Image (cartoon, grey):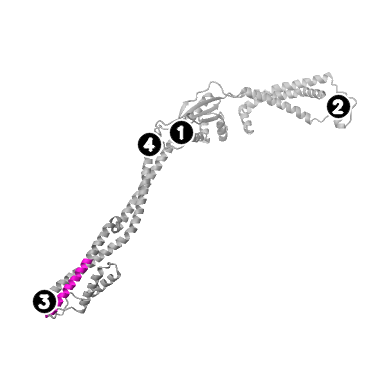
């Protein structure tokens, strides 16, 4: 065990110069980066989401987007590609912007920008912090203040747009519902005009009118029968008094019998009864074939007097028949209107119900529009919830980065790891025989004795000089290489950023 330790210590001492070179290279790279990377300055600004200046109990806000969601929307708008490139060009953040692609500018701006939102609750306000890192402290402060201005503007625009869109929506709803109300109102008026004889509100009057006309019809029929009986009596008197010419024809006698039968039927049946309708048709048919005042009398005075009386009665009967016909037409019209009234009432009720529903919607829309208009006015005057600046960014006095100690320590650590890896790999890959145990393992024999290789003092000194020169060359070459790369190729900070990006770090 002790021999193995001594052996590996000897190997370590033997390879120490090369390992020192690797350590120096790593340390040199770390120190070089730490010294050459320019200082960066981070400017910060804080914003506060203030509550509305007017109580919600007095004015209901029409902006329903929550504060956290609004800030998320603002952050996404702020971090857009076009906005980042515009800010970078406006403040000339990168010296070689013309040689950089828009993707690189957008990526580097995103890496240098930090936005943090601390959500609030009922007792704490919501706070938004914006930070930007740049080699120039004034540029860092200017960029942050530009972002702050954009956030304030975006916050106001978002709330105003939402309030305006809400008001515009209810304006369109009020106009649409008003148009529907006008159309329904016109439909109701037109429907009432087309069915004015069957409107439900006049149904009671029509029923009363129908009853009155039916009573009048019965009275006129009775009066006509009475006139016919009077005429028959006159004819009978004329016959009894020797007036031969005053007599009824068979048609007149048949007409009188039918009218007497009709009067009898109307006392028990309605006008719509088929038997009553049939009797009226027969009476009308016979009456049309009989000329008023037709008789077979002579020209004596008694006959003339009877003829005059009969003619008068015939005139009254004709007048009653015309009045009965007019009354029948009125009853038919009333009967049709009464039968159509339920259908008209159902349709009119449906139209009124639709009108009332639209009216209720219209009233609610008008109320909502008034609320939306007040909310829009509050937002346009910037008296609602808003984002205000607590602390604007100022140029920082001290750099925030880079962490030079960490970079230098990382270089030393990387050089040490490279040296250790070199030592392990060379030992694993070296299959030569250097110890008696290697001879035993390789050939399977036990040596009697081993004689070490003895170097002369000249060889030892030559090797030491070579190692010293190698270390000196590394000490000189590494800084020169860094200087050449930084001067003629690419600044080391940008080179380091590109390497880290390619490695995904």
Q: Residue at coordinates 39% horizontally, 34% vertically from top-left?
A: 57
Label 4: how many Cα within 10 Å (few below 14, some 14–19, many 20+):
some
SS at mark 3?
helix
Where residue 419 sits, quadrant-wise, is: top right
- What residue is shown at x 37% (from left), y 43% (from top)? 364
Q: Earlier in the sequence, mark 4 or mark 3?
A: 3
* The quarter of the displayed image where residue 297 is located: bottom left
Q: Which residue is mark 2?
A: 436
For residue 147, above or below residue 316: above
Residue 477 quadrant: top right
List the residue tagged with mark 4.
Answer: 374
Magenta segment: 218-242
User: Could you tell which of marks 2 and 1 lies nearer the N-terminus?
Assistant: 1
Where in the figure is residue 357, as x and y percent of width and height? Answer: 37, 48
Residue at the spot of label 1: 155
**Rendered view: 236 above or below 109:** below
Question: In this view of the protein, can residue 117 be seen by the observer?
Answer: yes
**Near-viewer residue (243 or 171):** 243
Which residue appears farthest toward the left when viewing the image?
301
User: Where is mark 3, residue-wise?
Assistant: 304
Earlier-in-chain disc, 1 versus 3: 1
- Where is residue 90 drawn, in percent x and y? 50, 30
Main secondary structure found in the magenta portion: helix
Q: Do callouts 1 and 3 mark residues in contact (Cβ within 8 Å)?
A: no
């Amino acid at each position: 065990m002790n021999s193995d330790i001594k052996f590996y210590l000897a190997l370590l001492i033997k390879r120490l110069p090369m390992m020192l070179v690797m350590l120096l290279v790593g340390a040199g790279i770390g120190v070089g980066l730490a010294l050459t990377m320019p200082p960066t300055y981070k400017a910060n600004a804080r914003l506060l989401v203030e509550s509305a200046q007017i109580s919600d109990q007095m004015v209901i806000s029409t902006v329903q987007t929550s504060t956290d969601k609004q800030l998320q929307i603002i952050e996404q708008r702020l971090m857009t590609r076009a906005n980042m490139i515009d800010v970078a060009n406006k403040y000339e953040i990168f010296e070689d912007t013309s040689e950089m692609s828009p993707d690189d500018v957008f990526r580097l701006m995103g890496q240098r920008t930090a936005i943090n939102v601390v959500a609030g609750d009922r007792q704490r306000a919501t706070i938004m912090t914006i930070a930007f890192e740049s080699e120039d402290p004034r540029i860092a402060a200017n960029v942050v203040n530009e972002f702050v201005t954009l956030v304030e503007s975006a916050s106001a625009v978002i709330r105003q747009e939402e309030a305006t869109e809400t008001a515009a929506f209810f304006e369109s709803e009020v106009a649409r519902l008003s148009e529907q109300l006008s159309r329904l109102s016109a439909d109701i008026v037109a429907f009432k005009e087309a069915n004015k004889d069957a409107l439900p509100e006049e149904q009671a009057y029509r029923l009363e009118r129908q009853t009155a006309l039916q009573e009048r019809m019965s009275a006129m029929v009775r009066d006509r029968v009475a006139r016919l009986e009077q005429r028959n009596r006159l004819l009978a008197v004329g016959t009894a008094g020797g007036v031969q010419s005053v007599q009824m024809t068979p048609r007149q006698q048949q007409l009188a019998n039918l009218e007497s039968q009709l009067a009898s039927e109307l006392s028990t049946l309605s006008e719509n009864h088929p038997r009553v309708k049939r009797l009226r048709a027969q009476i009308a048919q016979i009456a049309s074939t009989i000329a008023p005042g037709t008789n077979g009398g002579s020209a004596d005075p008694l006959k003339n007097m009877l003829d005059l009386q009969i003619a008068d009665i015939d005139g009254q009967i004709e007048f009653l028949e015309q009045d009965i016909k007019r009354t029948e037409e009125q009853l038919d019209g009333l009967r049709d209107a009464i039968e159509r009234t339920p259908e008209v009432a159902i349709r009119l009720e449906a139209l009124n119900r639709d009108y009332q529903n639209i009216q209720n919607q219209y009233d609610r829309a008008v109320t909502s529009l008034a609320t939306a208009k007040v909310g829009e006015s509050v937002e346009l005057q910037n008296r609602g919830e808003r984002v205000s600046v607590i602390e604007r960014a100022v140029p920082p006095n001290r750099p925030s980065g880079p962490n030079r100690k960490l970079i230098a320590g990382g270089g030393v650590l990387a050089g040490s790891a490279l040296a250790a890896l070199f030592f392990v790999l060379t030992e694993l890959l070296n299959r030569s025989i250097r110890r008696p145990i290697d001879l035993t393992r390789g050939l399977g024999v036990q040596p009697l004795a081993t004689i070490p290789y003895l170097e002369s003092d000249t060889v030892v000194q030559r090797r030491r000089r070579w190692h010293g020169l190698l270390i000196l060359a590394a000490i000189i070459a590494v800084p020169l290489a860094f200087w050449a790369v930084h001067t003629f190729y690419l600044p080391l900070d940008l080179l380091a950023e590109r390497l880290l990006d390619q490695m995904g770090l």
